[in-house]
Image (spheres, rainbow, N blue to C red):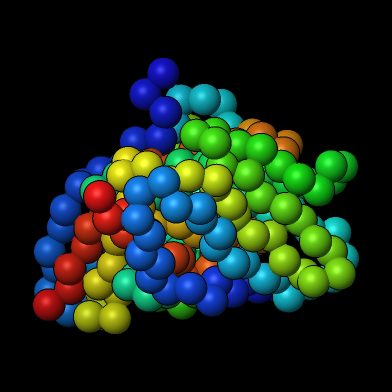
Amino acid sequence: AQSVSQHNHHVILSEAASLELGCNYSYGGTVNLFWYVQYPGQHLQLLLKYFSGDPLVRGIKGFEAEFIKSKFSFNLRKPSVHWSDAAEYFCAVGFNDMRFGAGTRLTVKP
Amino acid sequence: NAGVTQTPKFQVLKTGQSMTLQCAQDMNHEYMSWYRQDPGMGLRLIHYSVGAGITDQGEVPNGYNVSRSTTEDFPLRLLSAAPSQTSVYFCASRSRRGTDTQYFGPGTRLTVL
């Protein structure tokens, strides 16, 4: 089965700073890639997904991710973070048998 | 639509007890799945189902049973609870098309003493 790793366990940014969260997956064939967000006390919500086509994917709330096949990466970006972006972010890969990364907790300082 | 619902929200069990976590969806989704979430480990897939009568194991199936007799319901059974099963459990569903969004339920926080 595919696997995914997130190297940053906790990221602390000041408001308005740019965000980039790393995600690498293990399998080089056809991949379905996702980023989910979990706000404190809430369940997971889909931010964006990639299946094929344009490797730059735009999702909700100003987030985007770039699929780089040669690097097995699918990093999440946002040009300017807001305090409301404080949450845990999960990268995931797969179709029916989905695998999630360990998550990255984002703290936003005022 | 209620979306994906889970009951109970909280549960405390003693080691060796059995229980069933309930999951239901009203979106006529073919695919349903169960995950457990533990600190520092993200979500791990326990079991999934691609339709009524069809189930398959995920990453961490041991200690859990599932069945899918209807499209709407996908219960998760713990036959003999162990402290290692203390976790938050999430149910999710989506249509058969993998490109569609997967919706998660609110979760069940289970503690096994």
**Residue B57 coordinates in the image, percent (x, y):** 59, 66
From what the image shows, is residue B25 above or below residue A32? above
Camera-nearest residue between B93 and B101? B101
From what the image shows, is residue B18 above or below residue A78? below
Q: Residue at x 71, y 42 (%)?
A: A57
Q: Quadrant of the N terminus of chain B?
A: top left
From what the image shows, is residue B63 above or below residue A94? below
**Residue A92 coordinates in the image, percent (x, y):** 60, 59
Q: In the rendered picture of this protein, how many numbered marks are placed on residues?
A: 0
Q: Quadrant of residue B39?
A: bottom left
Residue B66 appears in the figure: no
From what the image shows, is residue A54 above or below residue B54? above
Q: Residue at x 86, y 69 (%)?
A: A70
Q: Residue at x 38, y 75 (%)?
A: B40
**Residue B52 coordinates in the image, percent (x, y):** 60, 41
Q: Residue at x 63, y 71 (%)?
A: A4
Camera-nearest residue between A71 and B79? A71
Left of B26 or right of it: where is A22? right
Q: Quadrant of the C terminus of chain B?
A: bottom left
In this view, the residue farthest toward the top is B1
Camera-nearest residue between A44 and A59? A59
Q: Quadrant of residue B11?
A: bottom left
Residue A77 appears in the figure: yes
**Residue A107 coordinates in the image, percent (x, y):** 32, 59
Left of B53 or right of it: where is B5? left
